Image: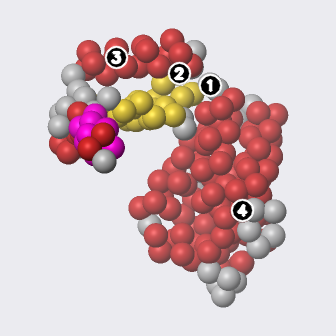
Amino acid sequence: MSEIQVASRYAKSLMDLAEEQNTLEPIRNDIVSFIETLRQNPTLQAVLKNPIISPSRKLNILEELFASRFNPVVLSFFKLLVNKQRSSILYSIAKAFVDEYNIRKNIVKATVTSAAPLSEENKKQIEEVIKETTHGEILLTTKVDPNLIGGFILNVGDKQFDTSLSSQLRKLKKEFEQKAV
């Protein structure tokens, strides 16, 4: 079974447990905090993935870092995974948990990349269009890439809408090259 499948199964199990105990929001917050901690500390991620480091040492590290601020369910979950030799996929499980949470709560992540910063009004317009299409809550991230020249690229889930001038120029160039041959 692939790492993604294993991570997804563990994430769904934690999600079900959190819903059963009515602690979904605090557990989600802890998992998001855990993801951020791993992103900011690649050394911690390397320790968790290292098969040479003993499970007891990994547990001690996790408890030192998170025991005072994480829900006991999350700490027990970490302990279970470390004891089952699954600490190497803790990060993948945490990301799968957030993805599952977003699916169950109908939260849609979108990224818009534009040539210049978007105004608040433009952001709201984009969010409204996405909301009409998906009927979900929108988490919009904006990026600026001057190489686009103009227009924008919108990514919603696995779909991409490219209205950038650089993309249109590439298409036009390709058409001219094909007609010239």
Residue drawn at point x = 48 percent, y = 24 percent? 138
User: What is the quadrant of residue 117 in the picture?
Assistant: top left
Q: Secondary structure at mark 4?
A: helix
User: What is the quadrant of residue 91 in the picture?
Assistant: bottom right
Gap between marks 1 and 2, in whole Å? Answer: 6 Å
Q: Residues within 10 Å of mark 3 (few under 14, many from 20)?
A: few
Dot 2 amino acid type? Glu
Return the disc, 2 or 3, that comes first in the chain's sequence.
3
Dot 3 amino acid type? Lys
Return the disc, 4 or 1, that comes first in the chain's sequence.
4
Q: Residues within 10 Å of mark 1 (few under 14, many from 20)?
A: some
Colouring used for the render = secondary structure
Mark 2 and mark 1 in contact (Cβ < 8 Å)?
A: yes
Q: Which residues are magenta?
A: 168-178
According to the picture, the residue beneath numbered tag 2 turns out to be 137
Residue drawn at point x = 61 percent, y = 66 percent? 62
Residue drawn at point x = 31 percent, y = 48 percent? 181
Residue 50's place in the image compared with 69, above or below, is: below
Predominant SS of the magenta segment: helix
Return the disc, 1 or 2, that comes first in the chain's sequence.
1
Gap between marks 1 and 3, in whole Å? Answer: 19 Å
Which disc is residue 124 wearing? 3
According to the picture, the residue beneath numbered tag 4 turns out to be 3
Q: Secondary structure at mark 3?
A: helix
Please check the rendered image and state whether residue 135 is part of the magenta-colored stretch, yes or no.
no
Q: Position of residue 84 (x, y in %)?
A: 81, 70
